[in-house]
Structures are given as C-alpha cells and as structure tokens.
Amino acid sequence: MNALHQYLFDTYRAARLGEPLPPEPGTHDVAVLRAVRDRRRFERAPAGRRAHGTVRAALRRWMRPTA
C-alpha cells in the first residue's frame, strides 16, 4: 500500500465518522525537511562541530585532486 492508498482509506474513514479530512500526501514535506535540517544543526552545535557548510566542505575535500 502506498501513501495515496492510505490517504484514500483515511479520507473514507474520516468522512464516515464525521472527522476532519487528513492532509494530502506531500503537504508538509518541505516543513519536515526544514525541521530535520534544524534538528541536525542543533545537535551539531553542542558537540563542537560546525553547524553549517559541512556538506559543501566534504564535497570539496572529496573533489580535491590527490597528487
């Protein structure tokens, strides 16, 4: 069962029970990604690691030619 099937089941159940409809799949994806990013930044700060720019720095190290 995928997200669309689950949404259709939940919509049917909510309509029969008179409850509010659930949000459509993908409605809060951007908010969830932002929350995950913010949580990772928050966890990195007390550990003494950089809170931003780590992916770019890792790519720069990986792409650096080794001679």
Image: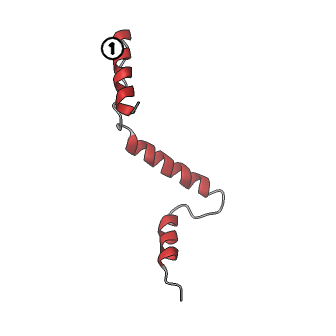
Above or below, 18 against 3 in this view is above
Q: Is residue 2 visible?
A: yes
59 relative position to 10: left or right = right
Which residue lies at the image location 65% right of the left edge and 56% below the top edge? 46
Horizontal and vertical percent for residue 51?
55, 61
Above or below, 32 against 12 in this view is below
- Answer with the quarter of the image where residue 23 lies: top left
Q: In the structure shown, which secondary structural element does the residue marked by tag 1 occupy?
A: helix
Indicate the colouring scheme: secondary structure
Above or below, 19 against 6 in this view is above
Above or below, 39 against 24 in this view is below
Q: Residue furthest right?
A: 47
Horizontal and vertical percent for residue 48?
65, 62
Q: Is residue 21 visible?
A: no
Q: Quadrant of the N terminus?
A: top left
Which residue lies at the image location 49% right of the left edge and 65% below the top edge? 55
Q: Residue furthest front?
A: 1
